[in-house]
Image: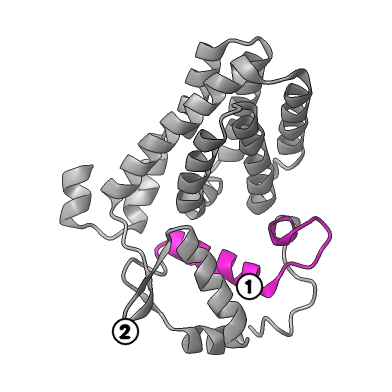
Amino acid sequence: MDWNAASTGGSASEANTAGGAGRKPRLADRLRCQLEEEIATGKLPGGTRLDETGLARRFGVSRTPVREALSSLASAGLVETRPRQGAIVAGLSLGDLIQMFEVMAELEALCTRLAARRMTEAERQRLEQTLHACFEAADPGRPNDYYEANLAFHEAIYAGSHNPYLAEQTRQLRNRLQPYRRTQLTGPGRIETSCREHAEIVEAIRQADAISAEGAMRRHVTIQADTFAELAARLPESPAAVDNA
């Protein structure tokens, strides 16, 4: 596909990622999303060399948007830049992912506990707006749209924690896990379940019940058995994966 020749293309979520609804997504952002998906699904396994010239030829674009996309992926920790090798897909074992999701669940849970205690009324109203947006985007045929609504929901909670350092640490790890979290939404019934979990979180925050809110978020983010099986199927088995699991 010649991405330069594509028209407005891309979903509303991609437009939001590129800097605002209704705006044509930047080419580099579209390339990044495509490469993210291929990393998450195992099409580009850890250790794969990402050659700028080859990618530019594959997508029918110049090397500039490819370089920008790779730089963005490197910032998120999905790609490593090595001397004399260039960009390489970061190697993650199944054990690595499980451990990262465990930490993610705890960081998000802490954000939610603080948000239940500290959110202003205006922030609670904003959170409820993001919840409504999640329900409106809950179409299994549009997982990327739901992912963007889901991202806004979590960002509202980070802001409501009133702890910028915690929010930034949580955001950094979330970005690292972004393609894997996005892929989870393609599972049967996962979007509907996610919405129900969001509603439970919001109700606990509305009641200023910090303990219930924290627990609800931890359950929401924790990898479930079906997701674990999906990740195991996508990643090549390695001694590290077996030892850490």
Which numbered mark, 1 or 2, is in the foreground of this view? 2
Query: Residue 30 falls in which quadrant of the image?
Result: bottom right
Quarter occupied by residue 201: top right
Q: Residue at x 63, y 72 (%)?
A: 28
Which label belongs to residue 84?
2
Point 57% across, 74% down: residue: 68
Q: Earlier in the sequence, mark 1 or mark 2?
A: 1
Question: In which quadrant is the C terminus drawn?
Answer: top left
156 w.r.t. 10: above or below: above
Q: Mark 1 points at which residue?
A: 28
| Element carrying mark 2 | loop
**Can I make out residue 189 in this image?**
no
Q: Which residue is drawn at 21% across and 44% down?
A: 244
Say which amino acid is labelled 2: Arg
- Taking the magenta stretch, the answer to whether it contains residue 49 is no
How far is the residue under mark 1 from the one under mark 2?
Answer: 24 Å
38 vs 52: above or below: above
Classify the position of the N terminus by image quarter: bottom right
> Measured from the top left, where is residue 147 in percent x and y?
63, 47
Residue 15 colored magenta? yes
* Mark 1, other Cα within 10 Å: few <14 / some 14–19 / many ≥20: many
What residue is shown at x 49% (from left), y 39% (from top)?
A: 170
Q: Residue furthest right?
A: 22
Between residue 159 and residue 32, name the one nearer to us.
159
Residue 58 locus on image (x, y percent): 54, 86
Name above or below for residue 51 compared with residue 41: below
List x then y, in percent, for residue 32.
57, 67
Residue 50's label in the rendered image is none
What is the span of residues highlighted in magenta in the rendered image? 14-42
